Amino acid sequence: MLDLSALRREAAATRVYAVGDIHGCLDLLVRLEAAIRHDLIARPTREPLICYLGDYVDRGPASAGVIQHLIAYAKGDVRRVFLKGNHEDRMLAFLEAPAANGPRWMQFGGVEALVSYGLTETEIKGENWEAIRDRLTAVLPADHLVFLRSLELAVRWGDYLFVHAGLDPARPLADQDPRDLMWIREPFLSSDRDWGARVVHGHVIEPEPVFRSNRIGLDTGAYQSGILTCAAIQGDDVRILQAH
């Protein structure tokens, strides 16, 4: 279990840009980061932080490109935090146990991720999961694997808690299941529980960003809508930036 009350706190940040699910949409990510740069020029702040909410891979065409881009930008002049989504969780599970996790991963975007790393659809359709895992392992850059394994589950900043999916309302903050932070939908989405912090998350596609008293949802389905969403958060001020 994970004690969220003991999370690393980003006390130094003066504004957080929370980026919703990217899902292999490198073109949208590049445009959104340009919008963030322009926002920082127009509204300078001392210590900005960009928090990516997870789901970098699958579904869209450029999973490998997105991860390579994020690794390069992690060394930039704006500090960044990368959270772990359920799709990264499934990709890592496939690498550990391909036969058990291959079929499920393919159902929600693994094919596109594998193709982005140079595998062919013919290879993938053969469903020789061990061979597919070995092929992926052979072409997966070492720094991509390090990146995937280093992703965080949650970050606390002021009155906000950033996670990929949400929290289990039936559990105290000191006893959350890490899987729920990456995978939960209900009962989190319909819960009105006061978490002591507003939860900022992705994971559940909505046509527009969702604002509730206890949460903000930022997954606008980039791979199908062509819209990638970011919330610029500074105290009680929350502004939405989008790339189309």
Image: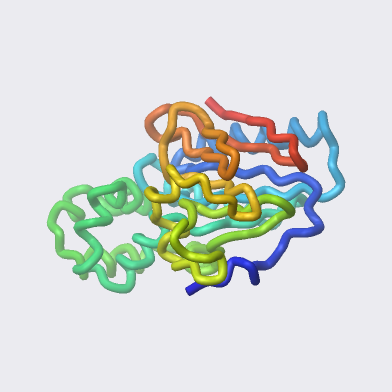
Q: Quadrant of residue 10?
A: bottom right
Q: Please name the residue shown 47% across and 49% down the image.
A: 56
Residue 67 at x, y percent in the picture:
51, 53
- 175 with respect to 5 (left or right): left
Q: How many numbered callouts? A: 0
44 or 210: nearer the viewer: 210
Residue 80 at x, y percent in the picture:
67, 54
Residue 1 at x, y percent in the picture:
47, 74
Q: Please name the residue shown 37% across and 31% down the image.
A: 224
- 86 with respect to 146 (left or right): left
Eyeballing the image, is 238 above or below 155? above
Q: Please name the residue shown 56% across and 70% down the image.
A: 174
Q: How is the image coloured?
A: rainbow
Eyeballing the image, is 138 above or below 202? below
7 or 186: nearer the viewer: 186
Q: Please name the residue shown 64% across and 56% down the image.
A: 81
Q: Quadrant of residue 127?
A: bottom left
- 236 with respect to 169 (left or right): right
207 or 91: nearer the viewer: 207
- 179 with respect to 209 (left or right): left
124 or 101: nearer the viewer: 101
Residue 70 at x, y percent in the picture:
58, 52
